[in-house]
Image (cartoon, rainbow, N blue to C red):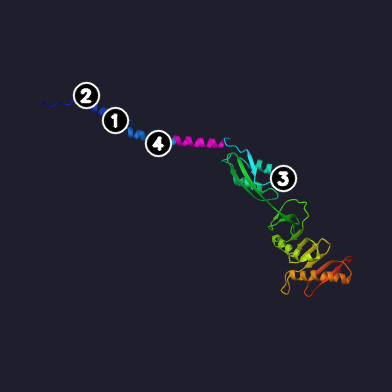
């Protein structure tokens, strides 16, 4: 059988087909095309989903309509609550920053602690712990008048309630509150009220009673405590006043074996 010779035209056709295959090979690979299209579709859906979530949270679809108090406050006013809510509550149910809201309410006078939580579907729950003032406080460094709560913490607020007044070095409010309770208990037999206490930087106490009597106590000593000296004075005062027939205006208890009394009407030396 005679072999068919390749014509020049056949050779040219195969070369052209080879060049065309190299140029259009991607489009003739369906698996690769499916992989690329799937990846593009995944990224497109991910971007669309993220944009949809961001748009949903940025739009007022879940607006906040109410602020629910766990208990009505006794010192914080309605106007103060509304002001804090207006300045701190931003965004919707999901985007509101609870920590910022909590801090805004804790800056209000009389608020010791605040708690904020979400209430589905359109509200916030607010709980307030208010200061319970027990005394006025005056720092001997600056003279500013503040208040002391039952935990011995100093805070700034106004009050018209009749309370004792403390004055002492910085950071001594908690200790003075404890001494106030102790001294008040010791003074009970005299049926008087302790209305003011001063503590100097060197530890000298000055007590003022509601009957006009003032008492001076030195700092703690090895031989006797301030409580013991005050107890001895309270026990002796009624008998001394009956014997002397005078009203005592000032008592100095800084002596180791007794005390000095200044009668009412005596000019200070």
Q: Which mark is residue 9?
A: 2
Residue 85: image x %, image y %? Answer: 66, 42
Residue 43: image x %, image y %? Answer: 43, 36
Q: Which residue is mark 4?
A: 39
Considering every residue shown, the one lying at the far left of the view is 1
Q: Which mark is residue 77?
A: 3
Residue 182's place in the image compared with 98, above or below, is below
Q: Quadrant of residue 266?
A: bottom right
Q: Is residue 48 magenta?
A: yes
Among numbered discs 1 and 3, the one appearing first in the sequence: 1
Residue 214: image x %, image y %? Answer: 81, 64
Among numbered discs 2 and 1, the one appearing first in the sequence: 2
Among numbered discs 1 and 4, the one appearing first in the sequence: 1
Circle nearer the viewer, 1 or 3: 3
Among numbered discs 2 and 4, the one appearing first in the sequence: 2
Magenta-tinted stretch: 44-59
Classified by dominant secondary structure, the portion drawn in magenta counts as helix
Q: Which residue is mark 1?
A: 21
- Give how far apart the Cα atoms at labels 2 and 1 are: 18 Å
- Give how far apart the Cα atoms at labels 2 and 3 are: 101 Å
Circle nearer the viewer, 2 or 3: 3
Badge 1 density bin: few <14, some 14–19, many ≥20, Cα 10 Å: few
Circle nearer the viewer, 2 or 1: 1
Which corner quadrant holds the C terminus?
A: bottom right
**Callout 2–callout 3 Cβ contact below 8 Å:** no
């Amino acid at each position: 059988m005679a072999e068919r010779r390749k014509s020049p035209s056949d050779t040219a056709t195969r070369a052209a087909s080879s060049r065309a295959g190299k140029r259009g090979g991607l489009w003739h690979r369906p698996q690769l095309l499916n992989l690329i299209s799937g990846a593009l579709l995944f990224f497109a859906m991910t971007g669309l989903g993220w944009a949809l979530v961001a748009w949903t949270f940025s739009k007022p679809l879940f607006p906040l309509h109410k602020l629910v108090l766990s208990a009505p406050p006794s010192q914080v006013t309605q106007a103060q609550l509304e002001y804090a809510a207006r300045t701190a509550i931003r965004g919707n149910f999901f985007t509101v920053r609870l920590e910022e809201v909590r801090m805004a309410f804790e800056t209000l006078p009389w608020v010791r602690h605040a708690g904020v939580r979400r209430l589905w579907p359109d509200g916030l729950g607010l709980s307030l712990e208010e200061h319970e003032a027990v005394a006025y406080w005056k720092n001997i460094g600056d003279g500013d008048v503040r208040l002391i709560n039952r935990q011995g913490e100093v805070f700034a607020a106004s009050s018209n309630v009749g309370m004792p007044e403390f004055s002492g070095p910085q950071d001594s409010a908690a200790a003075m509150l404890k001494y106030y309770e102790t001294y008040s208990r010791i003074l009970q037999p005299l049926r008087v009220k302790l209305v003011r206490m001063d503590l100097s930087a060197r530890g000298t106490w000055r007590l003022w009673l509601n009957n006009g009597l003032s008492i001076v106590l030195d700092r703690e000593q090895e031989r006797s405590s301030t409580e013991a000296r005050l107890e001895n004075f309270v026990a002796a005062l009624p008998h001394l006043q009956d014997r002397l027939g005078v009203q005592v205006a000032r008592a100095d208890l800084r002596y180791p074996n007794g005390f000095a009394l200044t009668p009412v009407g005596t000019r200070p030396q």
